[in-house]
Image (cartoon, grey):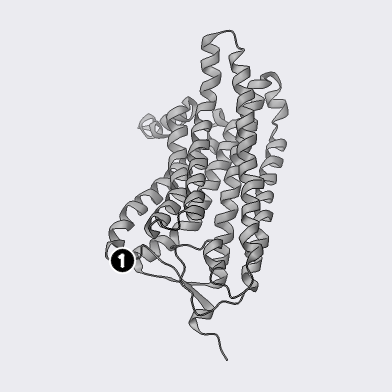
Amino acid sequence: MGLNKSASTFQLTGFPGREKAHHWIFIPLLAAYISILLGNGTLLFLIRNDHNLHEPMYYFLAMLAATDLGVTLTTMPTVLGVLWLDHREIGHGACFSQAYFIHTLSVMESGVLLAMAYDRFIAIRNPLRYTSILTNTQEMKIGVGVLTRAGLSIMPIVVRLHWFPYGRSHVLSHAFCLHQDVMKLACADITFNCHYPVVVLFAMVLLDFLIIFFSYILILKTIMGIGSGGERAKALNTCVSHICCILVFYVTVVCLTFIQRFGKHVPHVIHITMSYIHFLFPPFMNPFIYSIKTKQIQSGILRLFSLPHSRA
């Protein structure tokens, strides 16, 4: 007997009960998508081409921008396809791949924020050895470590999705594939897939946050020991952008986790909206945060956009 449609594809979902408004919802999401691509793309272009930004701090920022671009490019095409074209079908292989990259990049973002905290820790606690500790080779090792940790940690649950049989129900609750959505459709024992993500969340994302938190306690202790008020303010200012990015990312993680775990009676549209905020808000905000709070990025942007005028 051949595979029927329900066995070979899943059905993505936009905003249930608000299908007539999908075209209107599409407009702000498209604007956010374009803004994320332009913002993070501009950061990557600046850091690559502006020699003033060839420092460890900005290389880690490039990792963050690349991760944000990855999350957005992985998530948004199917979202926009559902909202504008009502293209809801997605094959199993494409769905599992999308879920893998979405979750891997989310864990990777946490790891990049931890690496950025390590950068600030070294820069303020041991400034004289900053460039000798964070060499290009060391940064590459950290980047590869962050990517490898994220990729390997998500692989076990996504691989198991390939093995599961799926029943007649094939409708997902979002316009993109998430592991927790897909596993609920499996006609198999999903105990491991239920508990393993909780272990990853606590062992990696929560641990990352705790290490970042304690590193900033030590950073603040060092800053408070600086004699000059101006130097204290200057040192603290180098951390403000990173702290804002940490808050943006981890607050959305906490809110989404609480709604998923304890919001059984919360309207489904709130669950969906919170998912979009979690995946879109950090990539949208991070370029603005660094552009507003970091003078070197501001100067790079001004130089970038003043080039045509200088040549005229």
Q: Is residue 56 visible?
A: no
Query: Picture coordinates of residue 37 (x, y %)?
Result: 44, 48
Q: In the current view of this chain or complex, which residue is farthest to the bottom?
A: 1
Q: In the current view of this chain or complex, which residue is farthest to the top?
A: 227
For the N terminus, the quadrant is: bottom right
Query: Picture coordinates of residue 147 (x, y %)?
Result: 65, 49
Binning the other alpha carbons within 10 Å of mark 1 as few (below 14), some (14 to 19) or many (20 upward) gives some
Q: Relative to 185, is 81 on the left or the right?
A: left
Query: Picture coordinates of residue 24 (x, y %)?
Result: 28, 58
**Count of picture labels:** 1
Label 1 sits on residue: 19
Residue at the image position 67 percent from the left and 46 percent from the top = 203
Please state which of residues 196 and 157 is positioned toward the viewer in this rendering: 196
Please state which of residues 38 and 176 is positioned toward the viewer in this rendering: 176
Rendered position, 13 above or below 284: below
Amino acid found under the numbered disc labelled 1: Glu
Residue at the image position 70 percent from the left and 45 percent from the top = 145
Rendered position, 143 above or below 104: above
Please state which of residues 245 and 48 is positioned toward the viewer in this rendering: 245
Query: Picture coordinates of residue 138 (x, y %)?
Result: 72, 36
Q: Quadrant of residue 119?
A: top right
Describe the element under mark 1 as helix, strand or loop: helix
Residue at the image position 37 percent from the left and 58 percent from the top = 269
Q: Quadrant of residue 226?
A: top right
Rendered position, 197 above or below 239: below
